[in-house]
Amino acid sequence: MKALDNFTLSLARCKKELAEFKKLLDRKASLRERDDILPFFKKHMHLAALIGSYNPRINGFDRIATEFDLFGDYSCDLVVGDSTSHNFCFVEFEDATPNSVFTMKKGKATPEWSARFDHGFSQILDWFSILEDQQGTAQFRTRFDADVIQYVGLLVIGRRHFLDKSQYERMRWRSDKVQVGARQVNCITFDELLQTLSLKVEIFG
């Protein structure tokens, strides 16, 4: 068990790491969570910290951890937080392959949500459940330096070029409409992540 690491965000480093992220996406049509995605963000922590901006109440970006132990068997790929407002963003990365978001079933014309997508979304459900259950405990305070925190979830999965228009709209609808315990869970592709972070760097810079 450990607390989140203290962190100081550098926009100059963000810009350099953003260029590296674009190179990764340009170089590889498909991405694997363990081989490509997690190693990249472990080495590019300033860009990883900026992902926390998916929680609009995070201003400080001064707490961060990758593969962070929540409680027991629960582990989060990336956590970014603000130590002043006690707002956090919990991130689940999944693969970016042709079948990461949707899969075709024999006898059906409409694709179904993939097991990979459902797994990633369910991970976030479990995180939110255990966070609510553990708030106010000593272990909770050790991890977050607060009895209660506010947070959102982010699932990053798939590539835009693997989704047709209707599939993309289904994913957008789910992201916009489905909340977990009144908390937002954003579902985006890695291409959308690049686009959003590019805009954030431009705005903040």
Image (cartoon, rainbow, N blue to C red):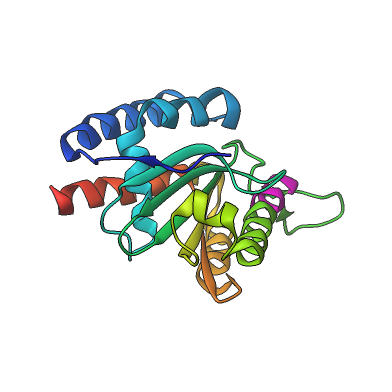
Looking at the picture, tell me which residue is in the foreground, 64 or 157: 64
Looking at the picture, tell me which residue is in the foreground, 145 or 106: 145
Task: Tell me where residue 149 appears, x and y as whole percent.
Answer: 47, 65
Relative to 73, 87 lies left or right: left
Dividing the image into 4 quarters, which one contains the N terminus? top right
Vertical relation: 135 (above or below) 10: below
Give the residue at x 71% y 45%: 72
Tell me where residue 45 sits by quadrant: top left
Name the magenta segment's main secondary structure. helix
Vertical relation: 21 (above or below) 141: above
Q: Which residues are magenta?
A: 115-120
Residue 53 visible in this rendered orientation of the protein: yes
Give the residue at x 57% y 23%: 35
Looking at the picture, tell me which residue is in the foreground, 92 or 108: 92
Give the residue at x 30% y 50%: 61
- Residue 64: in magenta span: no
Task: Tell me where residue 5 appears, x and y as whole percent.
Answer: 39, 39
